[in-house]
Amino acid sequence: MHLLFKKFLSKVRNHIDQLSWPTVLFSVLAHVLFTWLLLWLANEKELISFNHFIYYYIVTTSTVGYGDFSPVTDLGKWFVALGQIPIGLALFGVFLGKTGQTITQLIKKAMTGDKNYSHYDSHIIIFGWHKTRTAKMIQYILADNKREQRQILLVVMDDMTHPFLENPQVDFAKLTSFTDKEQLNRVGLDKADKVIIDGKDDDQTFTTALRISKLVKATSHICAYFIDETKIEMLREHCINVECSSSKSAEILVRSMQDPGSSRVQEELLSTLTGDTQFSIEVPKLSQSLNFEKIFHYFKHRHNAILLGVADNSIGDNLILNPELSYEIKNGNILHYIAENRLLISEISWSEI
C-alpha cells in the first residue's frame, strides 16, 4: 500500500513538472471565471460582487471555510459542492506544487551558478575564484559603507557551488568560458559598472581582459591582477580601459626594511575595515579653475581628508602624487585622498573652494 502511494505521488509530481506556468495560471483563471458565472446564474447576489467574490473564492477553494459567506440557493450549494471545491482544490494543490517546484529550482540554480543575470544593471562582476583572496575582496567592497549599492556577481569556471549563498548582496554564476560572448551575455557584462579579473593564472586573466575590454560599456571600469608584469605591458598596448595591478611584495619588503612600519601604512591605506582609507573622486565640470592648494585645504578643514595626488582619468594616467600647490585641477581629473569614509560629490561644495 505504501509503495502504491509513493508511485501515485511520483506520477502526480511528474505531471506537475510537465505543466507550464501559463497553463497553470490559465486553468486557475478559467476556474475563477467559471465559478463566478455559475454563482451569477444561481442568483447568489451576496457572493458575486468583486470584493466578496475574491474573498469567498480563496477562502472556500483553499478549504479554510470561515463560513461568513456561503451559497444560499439550492443550485448554488450543488455547484459549490460538486464543482467549485473539488476542481478548485485540485487546482490549488497544483498551484502550490508548481510554486514550490519553481522556488526549489531557483534556489538550486543560485547554488549551482546556472541562473541568468542578463537583466542585471550597474553591477560589479568578479571573474575568478581564490578561496581566501576573493572572500577578502568581497569583504572590502561591502565594508565601504558609502559606496554606491551595486550588486556583486561572482563568476567562476570552477566546479563549485555558491560560496556566499547566505549573503544576499553576492550572486553566483558558473560559466564554461570567460571569453564566449553568449556566456558573457548571461552575466550582463555589457551593463556592468565595475569588473575585477582575477583568473586562476596570468594567461586566463590576460585573455579574459583582452576579450571583455571591447564588450563592456564605455563608462565601465576594469581591473585585472597579474603576477607577471610583462603581461601588464602587453595588455596596456591593446586595452586602454583596463587598469592592471600586480603583487608589490618585493617593494613593500624593501620599504619596510628601510622605513619600519611601511607595511602597516600600506595595509591601512588599502583596507576599508579599520582606520582611514585611500579613496578617489572625479572632479565635476566647474565654472572656474582651481589649484591643488585650494582643494587640499578645503578637504582637510571641511572633511578631515588629506589630498594625495591627481590623475588624468580613472585608469591613473599621468598620476602625480603631492603636486605643487599651484598645480591646476581640471574638469574630469581624479583626486586621490585619505579619509575615514568615502566622500560623495554631493557632499563637496565645489563653489565654496
Image (cartoon, rainbow, N blue to C red):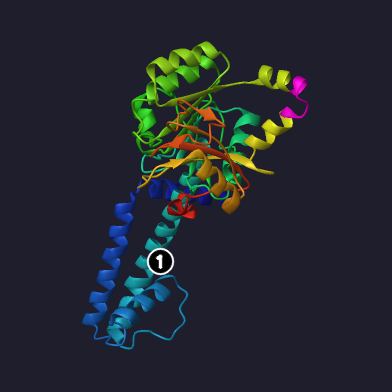
Whole-percent x, y for residue 231 in the image:
49, 13
- Left or right of 319: which side holds 39? left
Residue positioned 52% across, 28% down in the render: 320
Disc 1 marks which amino acid?
A: Leu
Say whether residue 228 is magenta.
no
Whole-percent x, y for residue 321 in the image:
55, 30
Total tally of numbered discs in the picture? 1
Say whether residue 259 is magenta.
yes
Whole-percent x, y for residue 290 in the image:
44, 42
Q: Nearer the viewer, residue 102 or 203?
A: 203
Q: Residues within 10 Å of mark 1 (few under 14, many from 20)?
A: some
Tell me the magenta residue range.
256-262
Q: Nearer the viewer, residue 178 or 218?
A: 218
Whole-percent x, y for residue 96 in the image:
44, 59
Please indicate, yes or no, whether residue 124 appears anywhere in the rendered image.
Answer: yes
Residue sitting farthest toward the left: 41
Please indicate, yes or no, whether residue 168 appears anywhere in the rendered image.
Answer: no
Name the residue that disc number 1 marks.
89
Residue positioned 43% across, 55% down in the render: 99
Q: Nearer the viewer, residue 21 or 337?
A: 337
Residue positioned 41% across, 43% down in the render: 122
Q: Is residue 278 above or below residue 166?
A: above
Residue sitting farthest toward the top: 230
